Image: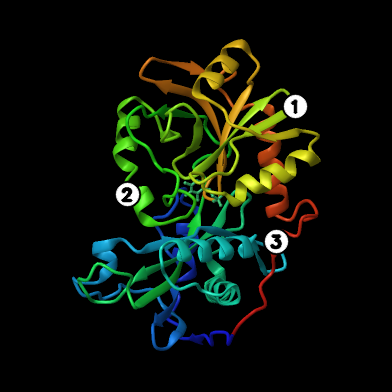
Amino acid sequence: MTTLDFAHERTDPMPAEQREEFLRMPGFGSLYSDHMVTARWTADRGWHDARSRPLAAFTLHPATMAFHYGQTIFEGLKAFWRPDGRHVLFRPRDHAARFARSARRMAMPELPETDFLAAVTALLCIDGDWVPRARGHSFYLRPFMIASETHLSNRPAEEYLFAVIGSPARPAAAEPAPIRLWASPEYVRAADGGTGTIKCGGNYGGSYVAQREAAAHGCHQVVWLDARERRYVEEVGGSNLFFVEGDRLVTPPLSETLLAGVTRDSILRLAGRLGLAVAEEPVTLEDWERGCRSGRITETFACGTARALAPVGHAVTPAGEWAIGDGTTGPVTRRLLNTLLDIQYGETPDEFGWLHTPERTP
Ligand SMILES: *Cc1c(COP(=O)(O)O)cnc(C)c1O
């Protein structure tokens, strides 16, 4: 297979002073770097026209298939700054592999791993000044693909647009605040045989009605229960869930309805290093409540690329609510978060080989 050749077209970067001011403001996902990377796929030519170019709006015909039938997939991964002026990407190959899995499930063309890596590297090299330096800060890369063919037929498109945009990610606070989770009795995120294991747009659009319900109950996010029995705790919005029982770490097993988080996998591997036993086993809502009330479950946290680890302080259901531990961030959550950040910021050796230092491109 031939690899894509990237052309590079530069724009005048944002003045450094203005950029630095942007990088100091806390927040996520509302600012974008100067460039984007795009590539096209057509049934007759395969992948072609790969380039980094100034960030700009797309012009799309109203009959673009993505608008109507939802063939859209995405990834989210992070780059971190290094004192030598280079940058590192966290587990980009795992994100490339999941992007390919998402594409297969949605009958979209796969982007080879080497091209995925070349695309995120191209954006990182051209917009390297957008990678914030402070611990806890990072550059969030959003690769995505949409069906770009203009047609109203209900079938897989024959043209696709792939793009990568980047956004500096800055934490709102030095210490993550515990979140409240709402267990939706009515809505489900994923069912066996469905698309719950991949990152396609529809999974999220279909979940916002429950997120609204969560907000109405004073909660930040939804904790999803299984579609069959509405008993088993699966995951949270865009994060996987872990329970701490003393020095044991429990997380629901991968299934046809769980998104296999790269962070989830990282936590499972880091746990051993911290002397924690790990178990991938089903947890019911009832187990969780009883465990918290009896003191067996001492902590719960959600984890994902965007926010690393988010402590869960309270769980809320229509029948009532309970606190996890004393409702604050527990010591195991804090240690796991710090260990992960230490690796990402180069303060501890990367013994798992998770960091990828891209070669510079022109
Ligand atoms: C992206 C995502 C996660 C977390 O995956 P990471 O690879 O750790 O970022 C978990 N659940 C859902 C539903 C997601 O979309």
What amino acid is at disc 2? Answer: Gly
Q: Residue 252, relative to residue 128: is it above or below?
A: above
Q: Mark 1 = which residue?
A: 247
- Residue 123 visible from this viewpoint: yes
Q: What kind of element bears circle 1?
A: loop
Q: Is residue 202 above or below residue 45?
A: above
* Callout 2: SS: helix
The residue positioned 55% from the left and 72% from the top of the image is 116
* Amino acid tagged 1: Asp
Q: CA distance from mark 3 to mark 1?
A: 27 Å
> Disc 3 designates what residue?
355
Whether ligand 1 has any atom under 8 Å from the Cβ at mark 2 is answered as no
Q: Nearer the viewer, residue 336 or 146?
A: 146
Determine contact: label 1, label 2, CB under 8 Å.
no
Name the mark nearer the viewer: 3 or 1: 1
Quick check: can you spot residue 166? no
Image-quadrant location for residue 292:
top right
Query: Mark 2 to mark 3: distance in Å?
Result: 32 Å
**Percent x, y for residue 166?**
47, 64
Amino acid tagged 3: Leu
Residue bearing mark 2: 205
Q: Earlier in the sequence, mark 3 or mark 1?
A: 1
For marks 2 and 3, the one nearer the N-term is 2
Q: Position of residue 42 (x, y in %)?
A: 38, 83
**Of label 1 and label 2, which has the lower sequence position?**
2
Residue at the far top: name it.
294
Quarter of the picture containing the C terminus is bottom right
Dot 3 and dot 1 residues touching (CB under 8 Å): no
- Residue in the image at 50% along x and 36% along y: 234
Binning the other alpha carbons within 10 Å of mark 2 as few (below 14), some (14 to 19) or many (20 upward) gives few
Residue drawn at x 72%, y 23% as measured from the top left:
246
* 266, above or below 70, in the image: above
